[in-house]
Image (cartoon, rainbow, N blue to C red):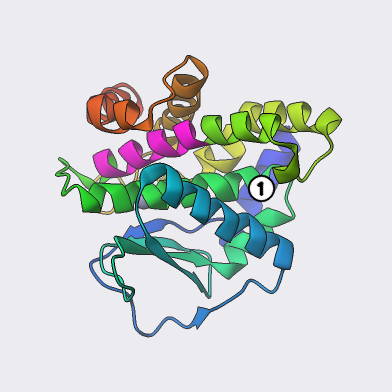
Amino acid sequence: MKLIFISFLLFPCITYSQCNIQNSPNSSVRHLSTTNNSQLDNLIFGEKTELESLLMLKTKLNIAKGTNGLAYPSCSLNNCNGTIELGVDLLNLEYNRRGGKYFIVGILAHEFAHIIQFKNNMIFESTVQQEIHADIFAGWYLGYYFDQLIGNSPKRFLPASDLMSSIKNFKNNLKISFGQIGDTQYYSVNHHGNYTTRLMALHHGIDSYDRGFTNWREVFFRWGKNDATHLINKWNH
Ligand SMILES: [Zn+2]
């Protein structure tokens, strides 16, 4: 375990960079229509459809160069609530890593959380509150996703016998996936939350679903902001 974690520290350049929220797309970023991996495309665009159906919204999803995730409220499609951009290098790297497919689903759900925030004109005290709020939803969605995966064999990319252990392993190693995208730039307007806060936000989201809070609206709108503030006050320092 220690060795695996150290390896992440040695190669930070190939991990998820950061989620950016912008008003409009960066026109200099080249958009790709595919990751060049049909199974990876199926995972991303399949889960995009699932999220859109569950959340009753429509998004445009761009695959872009690099390792960033990005969400913005504008969209070039009709009746569309916003645009999400995912870095192809991030996606390809994670797809081949143990537990990486779940991490990709979590990142996608995190970006979708921003689209819901935009759609509902939600106001946050700070970037970190907005990001931790999105992380809680990403955790909740992973709980929902695991439930679907266990009950829906056509969606599985692993035999049933391996599925439970892979989910358990992912949950036990959230610090390697989501913890490591935390930052300590406490005084930056772009601060997204430190290692522990982001880790605890994901745990809290998954745990909310597992404890029976299966309505995403309750987790998102009723408790989300207060829970984010509570986690920030407790861990983000
Ligand atoms: Zn974000």
Residue at screen point 25% across, 47% down? 117
The answer to whether residue 21 is visible is: yes
Residue at screen point 60% across, 28% down? 147
Q: Left or right of 236: which side holds 65?
A: right
Viewer-side residue, 231 vs 188: 231
Q: Tell me which segment is drawn in magenta.
A: 129-141
Per the picture, the main secondary structure of the magenta-coloured stretch is helix
Residue 130 magenta-highlighted: yes
Residue 139 horizontal/vertical position (percent): 47, 33
State whether residue 161 is above or below residue 41: above
Q: Tag 1: residue type? A: Gly
From the image, which quarter does the N terminus lie in?
A: top right
Viewer-side residue, 64 vs 13: 64
The answer to whether residue 188 is visible is: no
Label 1: few (<14), some (14–19) or many (≥20) C-alpha neighbours in 10 Å: some
Number of numbered discs present? 1
Q: Quadrant of residue 226?
A: top left
Find the residue positioned furthest to the top. 211
State whether residue 229 is above or below residue 177: above
Residue 27 horizontal/vertical position (percent): 34, 83
Residue at screen point 40% across, 56% down? 19
From the image, which quarter does the C terminus lie in?
A: top left
Q: Left or right of 60: which side holds 15?
A: right
Residue 3 horizontal/vertical position (percent): 74, 39
- Give the secondary structure at mark 1: helix
State whether residue 24 is above or below residue 212: below
Q: Which residue is mark 1?
A: 100
Viewer-side residue, 190 vs 7: 190
